[in-house]
Image: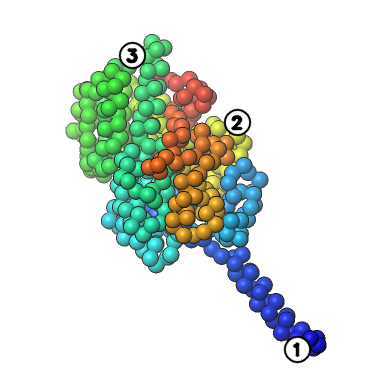
């Protein structure tokens, strides 16, 4: 063929078209839905969650020198460098709003996966919608044990649930008793949604098995305007340990009411939730020196794993606060989901689900004190080791288990 100027121009146009097509392939987005309370009483939780997910997306979409999945590549290499794009939805702490928002994310925003949701009651409805549409749902920070026992194929949770957390608490009590501490009676205080109910059921079962007497088991209405009657019952019971399962606003009201009625528990061991939130300690932290909360994250880990401190700094620049038990789990939730999408080399729901099933992420490639991330047949990571944290001198320190502890527990609390 004779080479003419026209052939050269046409060849140039064809090459440019191919380059444009290639560039589009490289610029392809992977859209993930993130559903949290962004308005209402739990709005701050949602705002902090946004910052955690944005931090994770930054690490995935850009190059960082961290031993973390996808940190050392730009985007998802399994999908030609495609970048993660997050679409946030507000469920307003309402399970039915969560259901509607999940459906909108799937049908209108065309997300290939969803991560959420803070409130376990909302996770119930969101995961049902994801199951119907065969879209993977990663339960980043919901802790109700019943969530992974509903026979769902598209439900996954990398973090511990409340039976695992509660077992750590009772292991801690047993260890203290061996050292001569008197711990015989417990008071349970829990809100009436699935979170509080599941938490109390787990604690009642363990108390019976381990030989502790539950002298008060008080269920209250979530977001109650008054807890006076309930606190009077707690004061009368005067247990060796008060074990609350409450979200932030209820936790603040509980502590204020205890102060008003002169009830000073010997020890408080909380099921996280509000008792891990900065807002609670800003409001009533002066009354909580020595409170203990369970968790799945410890910033103390940064001493052994410097990456943890550096990633925390990235989050702190966005949020103005350190990672806590929730924001750390939210961060890891997106990392785990993106890692699966990358290995699936696809945005098809079933292929992502298969990749999640095959997940085998070493604990030292996370920011958590976990052994690893592997999912059981029910979608639960059984190797997510909990920790107990004590609030001392306006910060949390790890006190249990011994291999993670950096300080001895102060018992009873001040």
Crowding at dot 2, Cα within 10 Å, few <14 / some 14-19 / many 20+, comes out as few
Numbered disc in front, either 3 or 1? 1
Which secondary structure, mark 3? loop
Where is 112 relative to 246, above or below? below
Q: Residue at x 54, y 31 (%)?
A: 300
Which secondary structure, mark 1? helix
| Drawn side of residue 342 relative to residue 208, left or right | right
User: Which dot marks residue 182?
Assistant: 3
Please tell me which of labels 1 and 2 falls first in the chain. 1
Where is 174 relative to 346, above or below? above
Residue 323, image x, y percentages: 50, 41
Q: Residue at x 22, y 32 (%)?
A: 218
User: Which dot marks residue 304?
Assistant: 2
Q: From mark 1 to mark 2, how far is it between C-alphas?
A: 65 Å
Please tell me which of labels 3 and 1 falls first in the chain. 1
Q: Quadrant of residue 182?
A: top left
Residue 344, image x, y percentages: 52, 54
Q: Residue at x 27, y 42 (%)?
A: 194
Crowding at dot 1, Cα within 10 Å, few <14 / some 14-19 / many 20+, comes out as few
Numbered disc in front, either 1 or 2? 1
Residue 30, image x, y percentages: 51, 60
Q: From mark 2 to mark 3, how far is it between C-alphas?
A: 34 Å
Q: Quadrant of residue 272?
A: top left
């Amino acid at each position: 063929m004779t080479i003419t100027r026209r052939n050269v121009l046409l060849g140039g146009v064809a090459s440019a078209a191919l380059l444009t097509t290639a560039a589009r392939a490289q610029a392809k987005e992977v859209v993930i839905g993130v559903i949290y309370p962004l308005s209402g009483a739990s709005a701050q939780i949602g705002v902090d969650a946004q910052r955690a997910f944005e931090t994770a997306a930054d690490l995935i979409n850009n190059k960082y020198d961290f031993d973390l999945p996808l940190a050392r590549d730009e985007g998802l290499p399994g999908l030609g460098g495609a970048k993660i794009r997050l679409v946030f939805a507000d469920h307003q702490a309402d399970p039915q709003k969560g259901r509607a928002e999940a459906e909108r994310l799937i049908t209108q925003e065309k997300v290939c996966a969803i991560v959420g949701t803070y409130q376990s009651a909302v996770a119930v409805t969101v995961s049902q919608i994801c199951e119907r549409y065969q879209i993977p749902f990663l339960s980043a920070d919901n802790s109700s044990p019943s969530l992974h026992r509903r026979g769902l194929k598209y439900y996954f949770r990398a973090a511990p649930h409340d039976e695992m957390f509660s077992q750590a608490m009772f292991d801690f009590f047993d260890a203290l008793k061996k050292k001569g501490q008197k711990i015989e009676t417990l008071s349970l205080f829990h809100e009436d949604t699935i979170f509080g109910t599941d938490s109390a059921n787990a604690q009642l079962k363990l108390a019976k098995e381990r030989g502790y007497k539950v002298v008060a088991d008080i269920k209250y209405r979530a977001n109650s305007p008054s807890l006076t009657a309930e606190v009077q019952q707690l004061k009368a019971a005067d247990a060796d340990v008060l074990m609350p399962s409450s979200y932030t606003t209820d936790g603040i009201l509980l502590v204020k009411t205890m102060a008003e009625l002169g009830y000073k528990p010997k020890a408080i061991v909380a099921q996280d939730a509000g008792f891990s939130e900065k807002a609670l300690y800003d409001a009533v932290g002066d009354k909580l020196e020595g409170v203990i909360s369970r968790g799945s994250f410890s910033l103390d880990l940064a001493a052994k794993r410097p990456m943890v401190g550096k990633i925390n700094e990235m989050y702190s620049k966005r949020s103005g606060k350190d990672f806590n038990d929730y924001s750390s789990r939210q961060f890891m939730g997106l990392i785990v989901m993106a890692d699966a999408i990358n290995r699936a080399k696809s945005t098809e729901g079933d292929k992502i689900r298969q990749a999640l099933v095959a997940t085998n992420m070493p604990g030292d490639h996370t920011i958590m004190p976990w052994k690893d991330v592997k999912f059981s047949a029910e979608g639960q990571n059984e190797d997510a080791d909990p920790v107990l944290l004590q609030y001392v001198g306006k910060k949390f320190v790890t006190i249990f288990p011994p291999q993670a502890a950096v300080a001895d527990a102060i018992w009873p609390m001040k």
